[in-house]
Image (cartoon, rainbow, N blue to C red):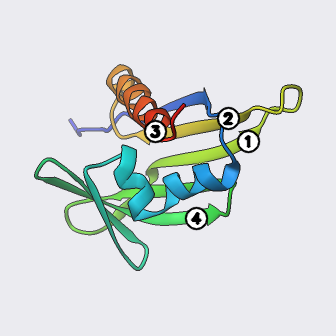
Amino acid sequence: MENVNVNSKIELEFTINTSPSILFNRLSTPSGLSEWFADDVNVDNDIFTFIWDKAENKAQLISKKENKYIRFSWLNDDGSFDPDCYFEFRISQHELTGELALNIIEQLNDDDTEDAESLWNYQVGELKRQLGL
């Protein structure tokens, strides 16, 4: 029997009361990401290296639009990436309230959505704290 990966997708929305450009900077630059997402972040061309404690994970920048969205795909150990395994940050403005929303979409290569959601909730809490919110 073949070992088949189960893909799960999570979508979360958070209200972040700041400007789109300030938020996008925190989502798309090594210095911004290292404030809330990882202990340290380095970039080489379109490959971002995220460092937590002593562990490193690399992700390739797949696409971005200034102040709107950015998508990364995690790299496998051999340097290849699976386009179906990604995380994306989207910035949108609520039409009625004018509030800024951060949408996080993550396509997981397993079905551990509960842990992933818990981690994102914690990370976004750090982001809000860094922004003084």
Q: Decide which of tag 4 and tag 2 comes sooner along the chain.
A: 4
Relative image position of residue 91 (x, y in whole percent): 67, 45
Q: Is residue 8 visible?
A: no
Nearest to viewer (mark 4 / mark 3): 3
Q: Nearer the viewer, residue 107 or 89?
A: 89
Q: Residues within 10 Å of mark 3 (few under 14, many from 20)?
A: many
Tell me the amino acid under the disc marked 1: Ser
Q: Mark 1 points at which residue?
A: 92
Residue pictured at 66% horizontal, 56% vertical: 21
Q: Residues within 10 Å of mark 1 (few under 14, many from 20)?
A: some
Q: In this view, does 87 lie above or below 118?
A: below
Residue pictured at 65% horizontal, 41% vertical: 18
Q: Residues within 10 Å of mark 2 (few under 14, many from 20)?
A: many
Tell me the amino acid under the disc marked 3: Leu
Relative image position of residue 64 (x, y in whole percent): 61, 63
Q: In this view, does 132 lie above or below 46?
A: above
Image-quadrant location for residue 110 = top left
Q: Mark 4 points at which residue?
A: 63
Q: How far apart are marks 4 and 2 (CA)?
A: 19 Å
Q: Mark 3 points at which residue?
A: 127
Nearest to viewer (mark 1 / mark 3): 3
Tell me the amino acid under the disc marked 4: Ser
Image-quadrant location for residue 63 = bottom right
Q: Do the residues labelled 1 and 2 touch (CB within 8 Å)?
A: yes
Q: Which of 45 and 4 is in front in this view?
A: 45
